[in-house]
Image (cartoon, helix red, strand yellow):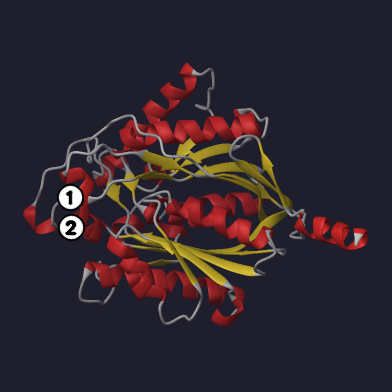
Amino acid sequence: MEGGTEKVEEKNKQAEMTGKQSIRFDEAVHLLCAASIAGKKEGEGPLGDRFDQVFEDPFFGKATWEEAESAMQRAALEKVLEKTGMQEKEIRFLFGGDLLGQLIATSFGVKELGIPLFGLYGACSTCGEALCLAAMTVAGGFADHVAVVTSSHFGGAEKQFRFPLEYGNQRPLSATWTVTGAGAFLLGKRGGKVRIPEVTPGKIVDYGVKDSLNMGACMAPAAADTIEQNLKDLKRKPEDYDRIITGDLGYVGKRLLLELLEEKGIGIKEQHMDCGIEIFDQEKQDTHSGGSGCGCSAVTLAALILPKLVSGEWKRVLFVPTGALLSTVSYNEGQSVPGIAHAVVLEHNETGLQQ
């Protein structure tokens, strides 16, 4: 009996709770492959030549914005399978999400792949949420290979959360531009040049902001909270990371994030980047505060961040996708816009073997 107990305890020791919110995996989960699909405007931006595929047609050959987004998700996942030479049946689980009601971009996009699906909604933080859960699933021994996919579409998001494009609504300078794009990732136990040793799931933070056209202000407090907790839990300093990269705070949210952390004695100005700032050229493309959406952090991770980690230019990155948890119902009923942010530690892995 004692020997049996020891075996169970040894088998179950695959991760440990670290600090208040973080999880450290005994054996880091490997990020094996990534793919990025982007729209025309994104292709014209600073990362244009880094995407796997850029579509000139915003409808992607479909009849509606929603169908177009589903097509992007399918294309991103198929690109990952193509790169790895794997088949759908070899993927144990899929964690996916988008911004549309009832996650219809995801459900209609992946329904024919036949992969067991966990549909997730974390607003624009969904990529981080999905990576956290996928890494936990692999680390826990519940799957050898798990896929992640998230997406957004400018036309679909504007129609659902703001105004139809035909209305020609004027956008304030605090507004962000929803990225048309989809990013897909494959996680496994070994064989990747990038690994995930720790994650810090975030909690909802609400400062009472009600302006849906100032998402950066809504999400910055949550990003600050998660970054601070990650540093505390893992006993690290900002300089222990080559970059601390938020999802889509944009120029307005970036300024607020830095101020909030500086008030607590944490300076990340030298390390901080934001996917929403990196993906567009603010002056040439007139995107106001920057990019946003589930696809923003996903395609930037796939096209910009991971290649720098694979090459060894960056050794360790804190990836913190951010989300504004509103709906048309909550907004129209006068509710505030709470924020959330999930942090994923990404490290260069020279050998590609499990560590």
Which disc, if any, is residue 159?
2
State whether residue 231 is above or below residue 149. above
Quadrant, the N terminus: bottom right
* Number of callouts: 2
Residue marked by disc 1 = 162
Q: Looking at the rendering, which quadrant does residue 221 occupy?
A: top left
State whether residue 106 is above or below residue 197. below
Q: Amino acid at mark 2?
A: Lys
Q: Is residue 21 left or right of residue 165?
A: right
- Residue 130 in percent (x, y) is at 50, 57
State whether residue 310 is above or below residue 36. above
Which disc, if any, is residue 310?
none
Front residue (pair 284, 169): 169
Front residue (pair 13, 318): 13
Q: Report if residue 271 is visible in the image.
A: no
- For image coordinates 27% across by 72% down, the residue present is 67
Q: Report if residue 69 is visible in the image.
A: yes
Mark 2 and mark 1 in contact (Cβ < 8 Å)?
yes
Quadrant, the C terminus: bottom right
- For image coordinates 46% across by 31% down, the residue present is 224
Q: Looking at the rendering, which quadrant does residue 259 occupy?
A: top left
Farthest residue, direction left? 167
Within 10 angstroms of label 1, few (less than 14), some, or many (20 or more) residues?
A: few
Q: Amino acid at mark 1?
A: Arg
Q: Is residue 299 left or right of residue 187?
A: left
Front residue (pair 137, 248): 137
